[in-house]
Amino acid sequence: MSQEKVLPFIEHLVELRKRLIIIFVALIIGMGVAWNYSSELLSFIEKPLKGKTYLTQIKKNVYAEVKKVAPSLYSRYRLEKEMEETTRDRKLNYSAPLEPFFVQCKISLIAGLILVLPIVFHQIWVFISPGLTSKERRMVVPFVTAGTLTFCMGAMFFLIIIWPVIINFSLSYELEGLQSWFNLSSYVNFCLRLILVFGLIFELPVVALLLSRVGLINYSLLARNRKFALLASSIIAAFHADLITMFVVMLPLYLMYEISVWVAFFFGKKRPVRENPAAGALV
């Protein structure tokens, strides 16, 4: 490798190190801020375990309607008792001495990352901006804003809509002699991992917009590879153990790909239309 090629490569590594240091410092600060709210965040994650979700409210409304319309069915299937079981005060358990401390660190780390996402995306943009044109560099504010908002939307969509479904499905297996005994680390790690997964899934349209604006991808490329996107979505979802989690990961992932296809169609870089010489000759 010639010296002319080595020097730019070293410069890129130095620049990358600088950006990573800034991201690391921002992450530590964000983690310190989030540490003060980690207990509230854990309580929010625990809500589905205690039955305090929108699913419980829907079930209450349905059971109340059944009681009004068909009281015999309400009594026969003991729906009132089932409602009490749904809202039972379940608690998480831990077995290692410092397990709650490390769980608090993990929650603070993920929450801190979300807090400093604008800084993270800005540093990523600064690192790649030398390879962009002056017009493309002006997209920094839309990129940082859209990247932050879509990640937060993905995380909230999971926590509010998907997480209660997963926990409710798991608790539906509780029977006489079969009792849930959730471990603190397993419960929180599972939730935090899926928060990151859904945040990244919702980033797909933003990435597609960026790449289509610089001409690296286009609508036709994405459209004709739909079957591979569906296959990739299935493979990624297959890394999650249970069928319900696989489904709730695969469906949003492929849906975001479809949105990315249409984002590239409406906002991607338009190719100039070539004139047909033969058609011109005929005219």
Image (cartoon, rainbow, N blue to C red):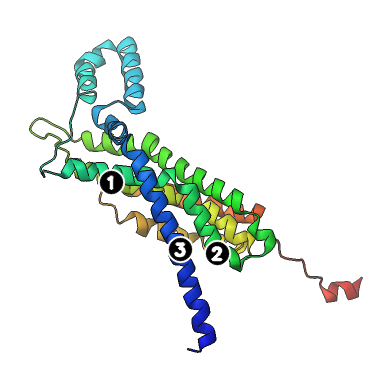
How packed is label 3: few (under 14 Cα within 10 Å), some, or many (20 or more)?
some
> Within 10 angstroms of label 2, few (less than 14), some, or many (20 or more) residues?
few
Cα distance between the residues tagged 3 and 1: 25 Å
Q: Give the residue number, with chain letter if any, for mark 2.
A: 128
The residue labelled by disc 3 is 18
Q: State the residue lying farthest toward the right.
A: 283
The residue mark sitting in front, 3 or 1, is 3
Kindly check if marks 2 and 1 are in contact, taking CB atoms under 8 A apart as contact: no
Q: Residue at x 84, y 76 (%)?
A: 278
The residue drawn where x is 50% and y is 59% is 124
Under mark 2, the amino acid is: Ile
Look at label 3 and name its amino acid.
Lys
Disc number lying in front (2 or 3): 3
Residue 79 location (% of width, % of height): 23, 19
Residue 95 at x, y percent in the picture: 10, 42
Secondary structure type for disc 1: helix
From the image, tell me which residue sits under label 1.
106
Of callouts 2 and 1, which one flags the residue occurring earlier in the amino acid sequence? 1
Please, which residue is most extreme toward the bottom here? 2
Question: What is the secondary structure assignment of the residue under circle 2?
Answer: helix
